[in-house]
Image: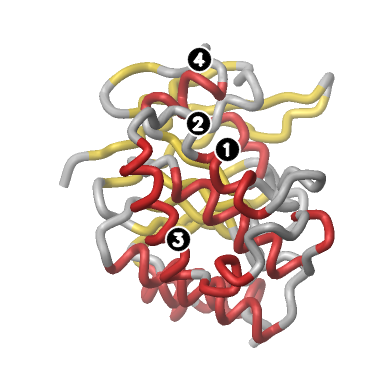
Amino acid sequence: MSAILQVQDLRVSYGGINAVKGIDLHVNQGELVALIGANGAGKSSSLKAIAGLLTPASGVIDFLGQSVNQLPAYDLVKLGLGLVPEGRGVFKRMTILENLQMGAFLKTDAKVVHQKLEEVFTYFPRLKERLSQLAGTLSGGEQQMVAMGRAMMAQPKLLLLDEPSMGLSPIMVETIFDVIRNLSSKGMTILLVEQNARLALQMADRAYVMESGLITLSGSGQELLQDPRVRTAYLGE
């Protein structure tokens, strides 16, 4: 399998704080890879650096065969990197439809945009029922649907998901993860940062465990589910 994303010795700092202390990871074409760990482990900082929202202190981020360390986020979107940010980041004063259309702002073919909209609606039929509703009036789960739908509109080659279950009800978490499973089964390449270790590992092809800015364990999702260190630290067993 070919690596669509290759990260080597990535370091991210905030002032004098080293949030990410030199990690290596890769994501192969068509894989769902999970990055799990406790709050403050450096997961979201790693994802933001990969997405071009933070400038790494050092290291190499290779996407689709080219170094993208210094590229801004908008250029990475053009290359095919999609991000569903932590906290959802919807445009609250815009409608659901307008939010989704923002995800397709690089698309010039109206027919393609319409097709992508219809595809998003197959995953999130609730959004189609409320297209004219302002995103800021939606529940947290509905905003998560909008954020995911917006990223899907860009037809990303790699989808980054940052804590998609955060703050959601159990029923909505199940809904969102069903969509992630479906996207993965259809071949979308996904890097998932998630605190719900059990859910993440159950669906992941491979996974990394991050602690205090370092990757301490890696393996298949099933291997890590059975690892006693993971079961004790993250699964409450």
Q: Distance between the residues labelled 3 and 4?
A: 28 Å
Residue 4 visible here: yes
Q: 25 or 232: nearer the eye?
A: 25
Give the amino acid at mark 3.
Answer: Val
Circle 2 sits in a helix, a strand or a loop, which is it? loop
Residue 50, numbered circle: none
Give the amino acid at mark 4.
Answer: Leu
Q: How crowded is mark 3: few (under 14 residues within 10 Å), some or many (20 or more)?
A: many
Image quarter of residue 198: bottom right
Which residue position is annotated with label 2? 105
Which residue position is annotated with label 3? 120
Q: Which of marks 4 and 2 is in front?
A: 2
Which quadrant would the C terminus be assigned to in this image? bottom right
Q: Residues within 10 Å of mark 2 (few under 14, many from 20)?
A: few
Q: How crowded is mark 1: few (under 14 residues within 10 Å), some or many (20 or more)?
A: some
Residue 229 visible here: no
CB within 8 Å, label 1 to label 2: yes
Q: 230 or 180: nearer the eye?
A: 180
Which residue position is annotated with label 4? 71
Q: How far apart are marks 1 and 2 (CA)?
A: 5 Å
Q: Looking at the image, is mark 1 or mark 3 earlier in the sequence?
A: 1
